[in-house]
Image (cartoon, grey):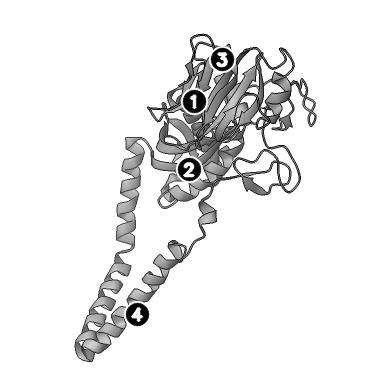
Amino acid sequence: MGTDNVVFLEVLEWFDPTGKEIVQRLPEAGSGEIKFGAQLTVRESQAAVFFYQGKAYDAIGPGRHTLKTLNIPILTKVLSIPWGMTSPLRAEVYFVNMKTFADLRWGTRDPVAFKDSELGLIRLRAFGVFNFRVIQPVLFVNRLVGTQGKYSTRDIEAYLSRVIISRFNDHLGEHLDSILNLPGKYDELADGLVKRLEKDFSHFGMALTHLYIDSITPPPEVQKAIDDKSRLNVFDDLNKLIKMKAAMAMEKASEAEGGAANGLGMGMGFMMPGMFTEYIKSGGAGKSDMQSQPTQTCPDCKTPVAIDAKFCPHCGHQLLVFQQCHHCGKNLPPGAKFCSRCGNPVSEAPTEKICGKCGAANLPEAKFCNNCGEKIE
């Protein structure tokens, strides 16, 4: 935390003992007097957003910074005007934890409606975990944190879970016709859901790094119907089972006649496809370490750039986002009142979608109703 000399705040730094805090403000009580020349220490997993007279002026990266030198270019011009670089500053610093927050839970509080092609309208429960990280600290503070002195994962987990469930319902309705085809599709559904949620998270300066589906469960009566269908499939495949057993018996007989060498050769023949399959699944040997380094994508030219870059090295587009249009996602300069792309007012947020059949409210851009499962026109 910050330390002071009774009158002015001299040293600004922050440690998170819980591992769950996303943002911490210094001074904790609000805007305070920061001594000109104070030492600001930002760790590798942090960013510091400097506010002066209620406005964010910069996101400061890792290192030790003195609040009077040219190593903070945007602040220097602002701070040198009012008092000739001699007086204290009425300001605050928001420390933002840029690490990946892991093992957050998402799940259905109430079952969501799903229109199954074979079983009709059923209600499903789904649960899982997800990881996220802040990638635009200024946008995150302006849109979610506001004037709160502290902001942790418990302040946002419930909202993010609701967003995930709403998009999950849309994704399931578009990519799954029946839950009878669900086994083996968890990873495919999770990957598609991450891509679908990219825009929702980016509106708040966040990135969804991983999402896992633990379970998707129908009501008990539907589970019983699925079990009954599985038993019928077993009887239908009884003929195939008998043929497989006969083939296995023939294989054992050939091993007994051909000796150990022939048996070993046949065994290796059966093992090789499995060995190659495991090699392909593991991605082969020698993956580049560069693939594991965190990156962000330039919103203008779509080129991957370093996560701490403020401007795209390929097209020069500004990557540090102060605010975004709620309607089209356009990055806007500080103080903008209208979007330069779509013309909508910046303060006007998109309204919830109302289902025409049951009247339930859903998130903006929702395609299927969470309450009745019908497609929203």
Q: Nearer the viewer, residue 253 or 303?
A: 303
Label 3 to label 1: alpha-carbon separation: 19 Å
Q: Indicate whether 239 appears above or below 375.
A: below
Inspect the image, locate mark 2, and give the three-letter code of the amino acid beneath it.
Answer: His
SS for dot 4:
helix
**Are there few (<14), some (14-19), or many (20+) residues within 10 Å of tag 2?**
some
Label 1 to label 2: alpha-carbon separation: 30 Å
**Are there few (<14), some (14-19), or many (20+) residues within 10 Å of tag 1?**
some
The image quarter in which residue 141 lies: top right
SS for dot 1:
loop
Label 2 to label 3: alpha-carbon separation: 29 Å
- Marker disc for residue 223: none
Mark 3 or mark 1: whose residue is earlier in sequence: 1
Q: Residue at x 55, y 20 (%)?
A: 145
Horizontal and vertical percent position of residue 68: 65, 24
Horizontal and vertical percent position of residue 147: 56, 15
- Marker disc for residue 269: 4
Horizontal and vertical percent position of residue 20: 42, 28
